[in-house]
Amino acid sequence: MIVQSEALRSLVQKIFEASGCSPEESGRIAMYLVISNLTGHDSHGVIRVPRYVSLAREGMVLADQKITIVQDNDAMAVVDGNFGFGQTIGPQAVRLGIGKAAKHGVSIVALRNSGHLGRIADWAEMAAAAGQISLNFVNVAGSLLVAPFGGVERRMSTNPIAMGVPMPGAAPLILDFATSLVAEGKVLVAASGGKPLPQGSLIDGDGTLSTDPEVLYGGNDPSRATDNRAGTGAIRAMGDHKGSGLALMCELLAGALTGSGCAGPRKRQIANGMLSVYMTAEAFSAPGVFAAEVKQYLEFFKSSKPAKPGGEVLLPGETERRLREARLAEGIPIPEDTWQAILGTALELGVERPDKDAAP
Ligand code: NAD
């Protein structure tokens, strides 16, 4: 079904208000989740609403938190997210980093113990909107999903990386991806009969490559909820040894260095750690020099002859921007089971379902 973005945002905001978040926080969570859908990252969009609400109910994520400063100087800060919603903690940490880099040219912010930070591009976009370049490395303490290259047992999560470069007078370049071959959300979709996984996305305990979600979730037992720890295998890291190495570096930078903790066998509260580096181009060269070189280079990059007739070389962030424009105009496709799960959560919390004019 197709739902207009504003109707979806409004429903999700009401759900979080009813679950105990302030109107401001509820609006923020709703906005970021809907942006994920608008940009085509449905696995990080409103599909998360029931899970976020149940995490809040279990006290695994806390409403309306503020970051605590653990260490702070001109160049850097270590901050604790206190297990607040990532949509609230993320902007506070990014604002701190932007403020320092605006004064000193560069800064680093190490964020520990944040609730799910969602689509990491959001934070690179926020820095780019302030005219800053950013590098963001993320890990997920408490989550084991991905096997290292050469191994079959899980040793890390889907550890994303996002980088942003502002482009004066144009949309920024935003590179943002998980370091696993597929996001867990895509395995979940395949498990419920949706789009099958690409070949070799998973690896079973005996080293066999697979597309069978049971490798991650174990045998299908309808009496229990999906448990991503129950399978005998793992998701594979992207790019063989290179992606596996990047994922490892995310554990070290976002997990160990921030103090959020690395993935491990011990069951613990799930949290995102994020190490972010902020830079202003003016700290490196005279105003306009970097932007001019970037503009010139991107034209050269994109001018490569397409591999297929009618094809096109795209820049990081271009697919998301195009889809965002299309979905803003035409609405967001929401699978029926996702829509029913959101309405079920709304009903539990006493939120009225949207009227027929606003959503189907
Ligand atoms: P993906 O595989 O769709 O890759 C997206 C990136 O590739 C974007 O930068 C996009 O612009 C670029 N891209 C896509 N098609 C392109 C093309 N044809 N040419 C050039 N560039 C192209 O992303 P993913 O790995 O599925 O990640 C999805 C989202 O999940 C991301 O937003 C990520 O931050 C998020 N995530 C979050 C967590 C967390 O713990 N918070 C964990 C994992 C992933």
Image (cartoon, rainbow, N blue to C red):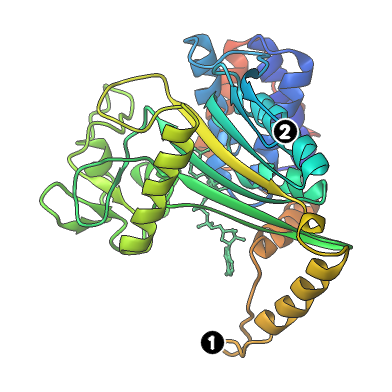
- Label 2 is placed on what type of residue? Asp
What residue is at 62 percent from the left and 54 percent from the top? 163
What residue is at 82 percent from the left and 51 percent from the top? 131
For residue 175, what is the image quadrant?
A: bottom right
Is 289 on the left or on the right of 254, as rendered?
right
- Label 1 is placed on what type of residue? Ala
For residue 119, what is the image quadrant?
A: top right
Instruction: Identify the residue position indicated by label 2 in the image.
Output: 74
Local packing at callout 2 (Cα closer than 10 Å; few below 14, some 14-19, many 20+) is few
Instruction: Identify the residue position indicated by label 1 in the image.
Output: 307
Is 114 on the left or on the right of 208, as rendered?
right
For residue 283, what is the image quadrant?
A: bottom right
Please provide percent x and percent y for residue 212.
25, 50
Please provide percent x and percent y for residue 292.
83, 73
Q: Nearer the viewer, residue 2 or 103?
A: 103
> Up-down: is 335 above or below 307?
above
Local packing at callout 1 (Cα closer than 10 Å; few below 14, some 14-19, many 20+) is few
> Up-down: is 310 above or below 314?
below
Q: Nearer the viewer, residue 53 or 167?
A: 167
Is 48 on the left or on the right of 37, as rendered?
left
Q: Is residue 163 visible?
A: yes
**Tags 2 and 1 touching, CB below 8 Å:** no
| CA distance separating discs 2 and 1 | 47 Å
Quarter of the image with the N terminus in it: top right
Secondary structure at numbered mark 1: loop
Tally of numbered tags: 2
Please provide percent x and percent y for residue 254.
48, 37
Would you say the beta carbon of the disc 2 residue lies within 8 angstroms of ligand 1? Answer: no
Secondary structure at numbered mark 2: loop
What residue is at 68 percent from the left and 25 percent from the top? 88
Q: Is residue 2 visible?
A: no
Ligand 1 sits in which quadrant?
bottom right
